[in-house]
């Protein structure tokens, strides 16, 4: 993504609470990723492990289900925008496929950081929706209430008094949402066409992640994590958070210049008889 496109994206998110990035991946890549999702979703349905609610199927923990999904989560153009909005130490909260089936029930209007106490002076999460099927009114494209991110609170009782719009986006696009903007997946009015997208959900480094990667990542995937992916998943220490057995030895000061006792006998001497 060039600097001009990134700047436009940031301006749109600041003004409206969302932005549509067009032509981020090409037609062939869209087809390949969509086929992967369909295969995995069908397998989970056949196995009786599919998660389906109100006519919407979710495929969770995509980090375990193919390098293509990891590549989406780490896409440099999208990550540059996310890090500009949050921090360079952003975490991947989760990455999930969303299969909106024909005749589904429209999702309730919500925000993506509803678990954080109001008011919200800033966004602490960003959702990147990778569009694999056309987003429009017929397919149940995401319903957005533009500008509501500036209110700093979740949807209220006077929802009907506010103007909404349906996101129109072509396959290969990415829809980026400020965590405070009011939105919800629409109703798929087609007879036989699912609308599939990948939701890469990022959060500030001090928030609890939606997916517990430490428990859910398969051992064979964990063994091959790159340093960058380890950081993105939350395996590294950030400002003293996420330590294992205490702070690293390297944080005790400059090596060779530690003051005070250097061994347990000096620190905890045996009592005199």
Image: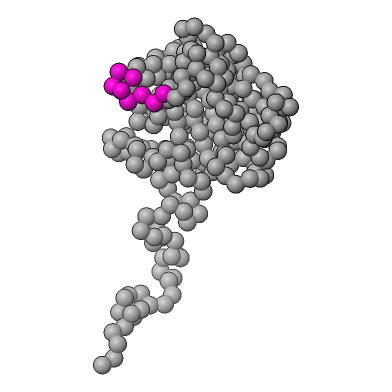
- The single residue placed furthest to the front in the displayed view is 157
Above or below 206: residue 53: above
In x, y percent, where is residue 266? 34, 80
Residue 42 covered by magenta stretch:
no
Range drawn in magenta: 45-52
Q: Which residue is at a point 67% across and 27% down the rendered structure image?
A: 145
Image quarter of the C terminus: bottom left
- The single residue placed furthest to the top in the displayed view is 191
Instruction: Using the rendered image of the protein, determine whether residue 239 is visible from the camera's viewpoint.
Output: yes
Colour scheme shown:
one colour
Residue 61 vs residue 90, the one in the foreground:
61
Residue 50 covered by magenta stretch:
yes
- The single residue placed furthest to the right in the displayed view is 161
In this image, 27 relative to 14: left or right? left
In this image, 247 relative to 224: left or right? right
In x, y percent, where is residue 254? 45, 65
Above or below 217: residue 77: above
Instruction: Using the rendered image of the protein, determine whether residue 23 is visible from the camera's viewpoint.
Output: no
In this image, 21 relative to 42: left or right? right
In this image, 246 relative to 47: left or right? right
């Amino acid at each position: 993504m060039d600097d001009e496109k990134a700047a436009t994206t940031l301006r749109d998110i600041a003004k409206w609470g969302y932005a549509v990035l067009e032509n981020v991946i090409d037609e062939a890549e869209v087809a390949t990723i969509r086929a992967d999702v369909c295969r995995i979703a069908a397998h989970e349905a056949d196995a009786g492990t599919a998660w389906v609610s109100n006519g919407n199927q979710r495929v969770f923990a995509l980090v375990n289900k193919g390098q293509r999904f990891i590549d989406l989560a780490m896409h440099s153009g999208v990550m540059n925008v996310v890090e500009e909005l949050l921090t360079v130490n952003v975490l991947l909260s989760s990455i999930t496929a969303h299969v909106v089936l024909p005749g589904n029930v429209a999702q309730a209007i919500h925000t993506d950081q509803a678990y954080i106490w109001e008011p919200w002076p800033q966004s602490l999460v960003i959702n990147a929706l990778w569009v694999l099927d056309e987003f429009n009114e017929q397919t149940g494209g995401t319903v957005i209430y533009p500008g509501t991110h500036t209110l700093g609170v979740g949807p209220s009782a006077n929802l009907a008094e506010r103007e909404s719009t349906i996101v129109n986006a072509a396959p290969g696009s990415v829809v980026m949402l400020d965590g405070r903007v009011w939105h919800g997946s629409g109703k798929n009015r087609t007879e036989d066409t699912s609308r599939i997208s990948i939701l890469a959900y990022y959060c500030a480094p001090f928030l609890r992640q939606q997916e517990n990667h430490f428990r859910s990542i398969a051992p064979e995937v964990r063994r091959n994590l790159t340093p960058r992916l380890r950081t993105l998943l939350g395996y590294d220490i950030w400002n003293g958070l996420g330590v294992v057995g205490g702070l690293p030895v390297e944080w005790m000061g400059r090596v060779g210049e530690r003051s005070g006792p250097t061994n347990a006998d000096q620190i905890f001497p045996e009592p005199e008889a």
